Image (cartoon, rainbow, N blue to C red):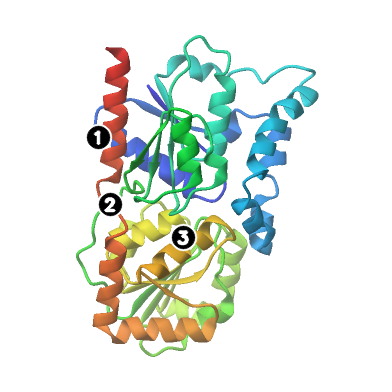
């Protein structure tokens, strides 16, 4: 069995884990999804992840400095075992029983990779640990002992060199996504406005501005798990909702039909979201990013002319109008974005793991 570990920070890591599980199932490989949060003590969950969403909402810019730092994660990884012993009465964390029944571990976050190695440090039969990137860049946090790291496309990084020096391999697979290419052009004037799993970067002023555009016939707003925002929008925009011009959508895993409706997509620069939009062949406007990995995602897509970027409402209106009125510009963005993704990414990850497992069993 393959254990797929993810973290509960937004929906990206879980979505990535589900996409990997889907690909493994297609190849007849048994797997299990498990949240790292379910097997860490409460105090450690709080220390590592407790304030992350609040910091994201407040747009703490020091995230970028941490993301780029070469010393932060080595220091953290050195201190973590010491902190754990101090908090755990001088003992290591007990290895979760699930590790005894798996052949390999797939980590959908570098924290999942680090703890997988930590729990297996003294094991007589350590299971190989694979990592899968869900962004178009790599954090120094991935400087770990890995069997293999699957990356979105071919590029080089000091992190990859460090992994190779530890005996690991790097495979450019693409980011696994379970969505299929959408062949429909979408409903004329239909715009999807996505805030990711947490419903970030969705302001009422932006929604009002978009509804003020005659060319926007339908606006679908994806609020994710942000219940307060959803209730606010339902109360504030009763008339356009009643008229069917505005759709306020809570979190859903059924994205295929929503992408099919959209003529243009607006979203923040989450790696899985960018991948899904590109695979579905929709022109993209990026309206925000979280400091660090998402800022790097934005730079990759802009550098390849695969998206437009809108830093404020006036730029957002201009970008959406451009894509609704210029099929040629929209087509260019779609083609450039398609070159950055791989529809077969999940299959590549699954087949490589299957091949490696057979090699070990032999």
Disc 3 from disc 2: Cα separation: 16 Å
36 relative position to 267: left or right = right
Tell me which numbered mark, 3 or 2, is placed earlier along the sequence.
Answer: 3
Locate the N terminus and report the quarter of the image it occupies: top left
Which residue is at 62% across, 62% downward? Answer: 228
> Which residue is depicted at the point 66% across and 44% down?
71
Give above or below for 174 relative to 282. Answer: above
Q: Earlier in the sequence, mark 1 or mark 2?
A: 1
From the image, tell me which residue sits under label 3: 297
**Which quadrant of the structure image shows residue 261?**
bottom left
Picture quadrant of residue 164: top left
Which residue is nearer to you in this view: 13 or 244?
A: 13
Is residue 280 visible in the rendered image? The answer is: no
Label 3 SS: helix
Q: Is the Cβ of the residue at disc 1 closer than 8 Å to that at disc 2?
A: no
Residue at 56% in and 57% down: 198
Q: Which secondary structure lies at badge 2?
A: loop
Query: As rendered, which of 38 and 3 lies closer to the eye?
Result: 3
Q: Which of the marked residues, 1 or 3, is nearer the chain's N terminus?
A: 1
Q: Which mark is residue 342?
A: 2
Q: What's the distance in space between the residues labelled 1 and 3, CA to CA? A: 29 Å
């Amino acid at each position: 069995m393959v254990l797929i570990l993810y973290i509960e920070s937004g929906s990206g890591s879980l979505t990535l884990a589900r996409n990997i599980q889907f690909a493994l199932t297609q190849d007849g490989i048994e797997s299990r999804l498990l949240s790292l949060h379910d097997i860490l003590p409460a105090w450690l969950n709080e220390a590592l992840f407790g304030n992350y969403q609040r910091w994201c909402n407040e747009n703490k810019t020091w995230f970028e400095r941490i993301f780029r730092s070469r010393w932060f994660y080595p220091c953290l990884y050195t201190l973590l075992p010491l902190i754990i012993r101090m908090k755990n009465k001088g003992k290591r964390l007990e290895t979760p029983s699930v590790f005894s029944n798996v052949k390999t571990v797939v980590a959908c976050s570098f924290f999942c990779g680090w703890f997988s190695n930590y729990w297996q440090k003294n094991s007589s039969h350590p299971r190989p640990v694979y990592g899968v990137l869900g962004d178009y860049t790599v954090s120094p946090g991935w400087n770990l002992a890995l069997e293999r790291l699957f990356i979105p496309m071919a590029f080089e990084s000091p992190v990859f060199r460090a992994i190779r020096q530890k005996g690991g391999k790097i495979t450019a697979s693409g980011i696994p996504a379970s969505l299929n290419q959408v062949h429909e052009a979408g409903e004329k004037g239909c715009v999807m406005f996505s805030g990711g799993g947490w419903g970030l970067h969705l302001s009422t002023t932006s929604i009002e501005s978009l509804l003020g555009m005659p060319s926007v016939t339908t606006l679908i707003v994806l609020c994710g798990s942000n219940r307060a925002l959803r209730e606010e929008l339902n109360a504030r925009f009763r008339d356009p909702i009643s008229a069917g011009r505005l759709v306020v959508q809570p979190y859903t895993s059924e994205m295929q039909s929503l992408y099919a409706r959209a003529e243009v997509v607006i979203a923040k620069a989450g790696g899985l979201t960018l991948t899904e939009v590109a695979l579905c062949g929709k022109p993209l406007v990026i309206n925000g990013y979280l400091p660090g990995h998402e800022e790097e995602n934005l730079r990759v897509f802009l550098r390849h002319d695969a998206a437009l970027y809108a830093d404020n409402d006036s730029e957002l209106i201009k970008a959406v109008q451009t894509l609704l009125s210029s099929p040629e510009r929209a087509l260019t963005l779609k083609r450039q974005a398609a070159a950055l993704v791989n529809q077969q990414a999940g299959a590549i990850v699954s087949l490589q793991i299957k091949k490696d497992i057979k090699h070990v069993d032999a």
